Image: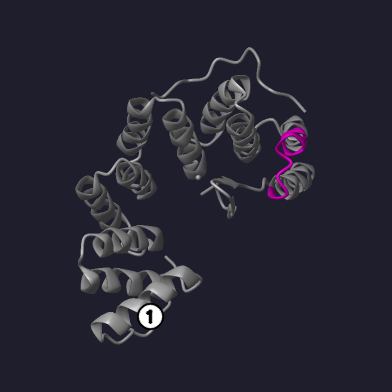
């Protein structure tokens, strides 16, 4: 809701990302500002211009899809939702592992009563990218949202087997274990997540609360080792 080398800016339900080319990046930045202010149609115009400036920017297609997705839901505009779906797919043509794009598309498919397609999308990504943790994390998110906590936990354990220092997976697993009534294991997961990424104030609050409830002591925080155009005629490579 992991663009190459560019940290995403997460906004509301959907994340928006900045792009590399200077003109495209400036236009995306302005679009992000407008999106933050709830001006989704105007944001979409800036993202369209960013695509015109750099037609191969996966982030720009993703941002435009996010703006149209939001506007389509807000105003019940089915044409915006249909175009957002095309744009999410085109984003994935330019970046086959764009995590936010997979998340946005999975949300859109769920929003339009195609939950099975959302699962096929994410399962397909996981199958094509066995070396990545993110497909398993996104599958876990969807499984959790559909009240399948055991399978969500399994996917997160798989993600951590691939990337033991993934703070997102640790945080999500901690949340599931806390909900399942296992505060000690949840605390351990949260502490490991904070050791990797200390900029999680909500998780720090949960740690403090669980410490108070269990009488545990916070482990020291240790830094781990580094390890304008729209597509009207384009036919996407549909993955679901």
168 falls in the magenta region = no
- Marks counted in the figure total 1
Residue drawn 42% across and 31% down?
110
Q: Is residue 224 visible?
A: no
The single residue placed furthest to the top in the displayed view is 233
Measured as percent of width and height from the top left, residue 6 is found at 60, 52
Identify which residue is drawn at 36% across, 26% down. Answer: 117
Say if residue 218 shows up in the picture. Answer: yes
Disc 1 on helix, strand or loop?
helix
- Give the x, y percent position of residue 29: 74, 49
Q: Which residue is label 1 attached to? A: 208
The secondary structure making up most of the magenta span is: helix
Please tell me which residue is depicted at 58% across the width and 32% down the height of the picture: 73
Q: Nearer the viewer, residue 47 or 150?
A: 150
Q: Position of residue 195 (x, y in %)?
A: 39, 75
Q: Is residue 184 left or right of residue 82?
A: left
Examine the rendered structure and indicate whether residue 136 appears above or below residue 182.
above
In the displayed structure, 129 sits above or below 81; it is below
Foreground residue among 23 and 155 = 155
Horizontal and vertical percent for residue 93? Answer: 53, 29
Question: Horizontally, is 1 left or right of 63 in the view?
Answer: left
41 is within the stretch colored magenta = yes
Q: Quadrant of the C terminus?
A: top left
Query: Which image quarter: residue 49?
Result: top right
Quadrant of res 94: top right
Is disc 1 surrounded by few (<14), some (14 to 19) or many (20+) residues within 10 Å? some
Q: Which residues are magenta?
A: 36-45
């Amino acid at each position: 809701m992991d663009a190459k080398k560019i940290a995403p800016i997460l906004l509301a339900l959907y994340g928006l990302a900045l792009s590399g080319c200077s003109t495209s990046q400036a236009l995306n930045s302005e679009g992000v500002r407008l999106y933050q202010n709830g001006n989704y149609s105007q944001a979409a115009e800036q993202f369209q211009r960013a695509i015109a400036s750099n037609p191969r920017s996966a982030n720009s297609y993703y941002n435009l899809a996010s703006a149209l997705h939001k506007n389509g839901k807000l105003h019940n505009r089915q044409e915006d939702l249909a175009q957002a779906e095309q744009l999410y797919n085109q984003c994935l043509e330019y970046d086959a592992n764009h995590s936010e794009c997979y998340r946005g598309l999975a949300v859109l498919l769920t929003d339009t009563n195609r939950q099975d397609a959302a699962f096929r999308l994410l399962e397909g990504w996981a199958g094509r990218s066995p070396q990545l943790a993110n497909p398993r994390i996104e599958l876990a998110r969807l499984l959790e949202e559909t009240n399948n906590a055991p399978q969500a936990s399994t996917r997160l354990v798989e993600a951590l087997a691939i990337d033991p220092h993934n703070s997102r997976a640790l945080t999500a697993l901690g949340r599931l274990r806390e909900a399942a009534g296992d505060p000690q294991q949840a605390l351990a997961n949260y502490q490991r997540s904070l050791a990797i990424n200390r900029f999680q104030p909500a998780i720090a609050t949960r740690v403090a609360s669980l410490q108070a409830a269990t009488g545990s002591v916070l482990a020291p925080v240790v830094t781990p080792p580094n390890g304008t155009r729209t597509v009207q005629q384009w036919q996407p490579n549909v993955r679901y």
